[in-house]
Amino acid sequence: MASNKIILKTEGLTKHYGGVHALEDANFELRDGEHIAVVGDNGAGKSTFVRQITGVEQRTRGKVWFDGEEVNFNGPIEAREAGIETVFQNLALADDLDVPSNLFLGREKILVNLGPFSILDRRGMLEATEAGLKRTAVKIPNLSSTIRHMSGGQRQCVAIARSATFASKLIIMDEPTAALGVQETAQVENIIRSLKAQGVPLILVSHNLRQVFDLVDRIVVFRRGRIAANLNASEVDGNDVVAYITGVKGAEDESMAVA
Amino acid sequence: MAEATTKTSIATQMPPKAQKRHRPAELNALVGLVGIALVFEILGWIFQGQSFLVNTQRLSIMVLQVSVIGIIAVGVTQVIITGGIDLSSGSVVGATAMIAMSFAQVSTYPRAVFIEQGWVDLPVIVPIIVGLACGLLAGLINGLLIAYTKIPPFIATLGMMVTARGIAKWYTKGQPVSFPTEDFAAIGQGMMPVVIFLVIAVLFYLILKYTVYGKHTYAIGSNQDAARMSGINVERHLVLVYSIAGVLAGLAGMVVAARGLTAQSGMGLMYELDAIAMAVIGGVSLSGGRGSIIGTAIGMLIFGVIISGFTFLRLDAYYQEMIKGAIIVTAVVVDVWRQKRRALEA
């Protein structure tokens, strides 16, 4: 299913916060249709890695290629325009708006263009929202109720549906189920499976190894700001991954590199 | 709603209680309006032996009294929806009244401000453009300060409040500006202020509801970071919102001056607070993201009914202010309660 086309590639991606080397020399590749999990302990550099790709922060050095071109996003909006949708850990939703308004926030469908006073295509947005939610198998009882009135799981589903509705090229999810209950987590995982079926590539940052093995093709382990391992999910088990996360495995390479 | 809930397989729906909370704040305000009006109606029959509501003249005066502040409140509502506040509108009314009026004087009045320059008997469009430009400038400065220096809206507009009042006094060294042309005076005569209010209110009701501007206004007040991450140019939008509020304050200034046939530097004193109170009473949340022009219009009518009712019952004007103050505090308390309940929910 995964074609050979490389969607995202980083080379020597590095981020220092002053003296803190949060990310060091990350070489990463993602192919079309591939789902990759990024795992690692707290502070291992997972979120830092995501923030460099999506332009939320500016990298210290290194190169990023996206969809065949070298890119240098000045902000998350540029990344989004290029086709990278991110579901952030802290949900970027407007609580007082309804579902279609949130899905289309900042890229509203327009009936008549009058600059800032352009008239909204409310029906078009509602229909596109219904279609988008159907495609991602998200169930929300009442689209016109505000996000404030929804449960954590429904909110997360809206956030993910927003990404899924627009992203044609790549979706990044940073701990999408961290704050969810069992059933809500199952719903989010179903959305991820449906994205897989549609061939939309995904980077999943997660702490949940059960989830990771269930969902992805490859597992990239971060440790102390470096990529410690790049594993094929079908060839390893949880113990291997934990060994890389904790540094039991892969440590010898580190010491060799130092020596 | 109940069927929709059972249809979904995943049991993550809101508890049934949550349904009750959907009652919009506008409805509460409407109930309040009807209640207050009925109280005055009953008191009217008891103490005055006549109806309070069935009196066309009383009702039209009532609406007329509050419609000028209503024009300001339409702008203030939008500012509050973004999570901001505008304390400068009353002073902008004063400054605009003075400056616009000085370009609207007749040539037969020898002490006209610009008589030496020959700027008298000008077509009415000149003072109108000058007046709107004054309001725009004040709003633009407010917006730029708030959006780009990140100082709190309270401080930025407080500064404008003091400065604009200063300009109003300095402009003619405290002298009133009188004798406008007939065309300019017409802006404030008869029911014109009400007509202007209605046009403005309907226009911005539609804009808030059906345009990108409205959607972004609510989004910024609801979650500014989310709005920014979604690609909304938050700074530019805030400048626009405060500019509109300024223009509407300028418009109100001209209506007040035209209505009184004179402009005085003290005009519009405390209008900003009345306008904010109208919005808050009408359910516009001071924390941003919620509210509507309809709510503000209802809040305006509540004000009108109270003022008119007190006059009707021949109660002292001092009581009006005391009651007004109590109502404002009550409205804010209700708003805070609602927020607390929402916070608990989330």
Image (cartoon, coloured by chain):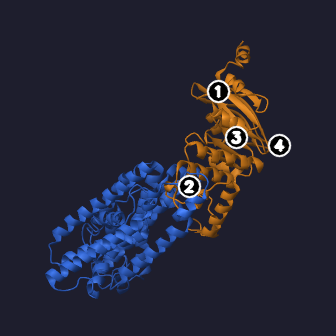
- Chain A's shade in the image? orange
Q: Residues within 10 Å of mark 3 (few under 14, many from 20)?
A: many
Q: Secondary structure at mark 4?
A: loop
Mark 1 surroundings within 10 Å by alpha-carbon count, few (fewer than 14), some (14 through 19), many (20 or more): many
Q: Which mark is residue A203?
A: 3
Note whether A71 is above or below B326 in the view shown: above
Quadrant containing the N terminus of chain A in the rendered view:
top right
Residue tagged 4: A2
Q: Amino acid at mark 1?
A: Gly
Residue, disc 2: B233
Q: Position of residue A220 (x, y in %)?
A: 72, 31
Query: In the rendered structure, which disc, 1 or 4, sits on the residue that comes first in sequence?
Result: 4
The residue singled out by tag 1 in the image is A225
Q: Quadrant of residue A27?
A: top right
Mark 2 and mark 1, same subunit? no
Q: Looking at the picture, do discs 3 and 4 lie on one chain?
A: yes
Q: Is residue B109 visible?
A: no
* Outermost residue toward the right in this view: A4
Residue B50, percent across and down? Answer: 19, 86
Dot 1: element: loop
